[in-house]
Amino acid sequence: MNDVFKKLNNISLPENTPVYHRGSTTEDKIKPTDPAISVMTDLKKVKAITVSPLLAIDDALQLMITAEVRMLLVVDNDTMLIGVITSRDVMGEKPVVYASQERLSHDQILVANIMTPREQVEALSIDDVCSAQVGDIVATLRDSSRQHALVMESDANGGGRVRGLFSITHIGRLLGIEIQPTGIVQSFAELESILVRD
């Protein structure tokens, strides 16, 4: 084994060594014409943040805050996708309406009670994403008034799995524009100008 591998040299850490943070440098800026795959959270490279349907929604929100995400994948015990839940679901009207209908207190509401079930979740194909640009994803999300989009990858058996996801907030940050959590762009004119420039 020693004949195949070589030992790397160690280096000393200089004084005032910064730690790289994604999004902290100008190199992270993207253009609308960049490949869409460059802004996709690829679940082959990043661990999916999942949650049980039996978790209380307040705990799900705390997980979102800790993980710095606005959507969680809801999975069963076999890690099969059964739905998604967003910060908008948790902090919006859904819990209030559900608590009123079921005569429950807020802390009794579970993820399963307000999540969007898998059957109602629309996804994009990884094949389409691989030939798309960032601007195409923004246009798609805006057209459907969605904050997020799942990306599906087909398998040899005719089924598929969740391969990745897009967040319009993340894309907006990389484009250098602010998109509010409600999905409303701070300035639609600014977004239009970004999407049409070369």
Image (cartoon, rainbow, N blue to C red):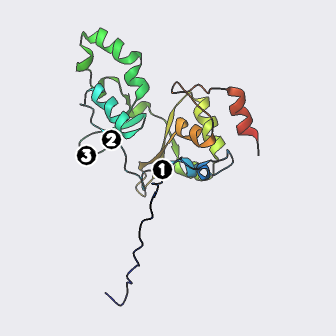
Q: Residue at x 69, y 48 (%)?
A: 33
Q: Residue at x 32, y 31 (%)?
A: 62
In percent of width and height, residue 181 lies at 51, 27
Answer with mark 3 or mark 1, whichever residue precedes in sequence. Answer: 1
- Name which residue type carries label 2: Thr
Residue that mark 2 sits on = 50
- What element does badge 1 sit on? loop
In percent of width and height, residue 21 lies at 48, 50
- Frontmost of labels 3 and 1 is 1
Q: Residue at x 59, y 25 (%)?
A: 184
Q: Is residue 62 above or below residue 152?
A: above
- Name which residue type carries label 1: His
Residue that mark 3 sits on = 78
Residue in the foreground of this view, choosing between 97 and 12: 12
Apparent side of residue 143 relative to residue 72 in the rendered image (left or right): right
In percent of width and height, residue 44 lies at 42, 55
- Name which residue type carries label 3: Asp
Residue lying farthest front?
15
- What element does badge 2 sit on? strand
How crowded pointer 1 is (Cα within 10 Å; few <14, some 14-19, many 20+) is rated as few
Residue lying farthest bottom?
3
Q: Is residue 115 above or below residue 41?
A: above
Residue in the foreground of this view, choosing between 10 and 28: 10
How crowded pointer 2 is (Cα within 10 Å; few <14, some 14-19, many 20+) is rated as some
Q: Which mark is residue 198?
A: none
Q: Which mark is residue 21?
A: 1
In percent of width and height, residue 161 lies at 41, 49
Structural distance between the alpha carbons of marks 3 and 1: 33 Å
Structural distance between the alpha carbons of marks 2 and 3: 12 Å
Residue in the foreground of this view, choosing between 15 and 112: 15
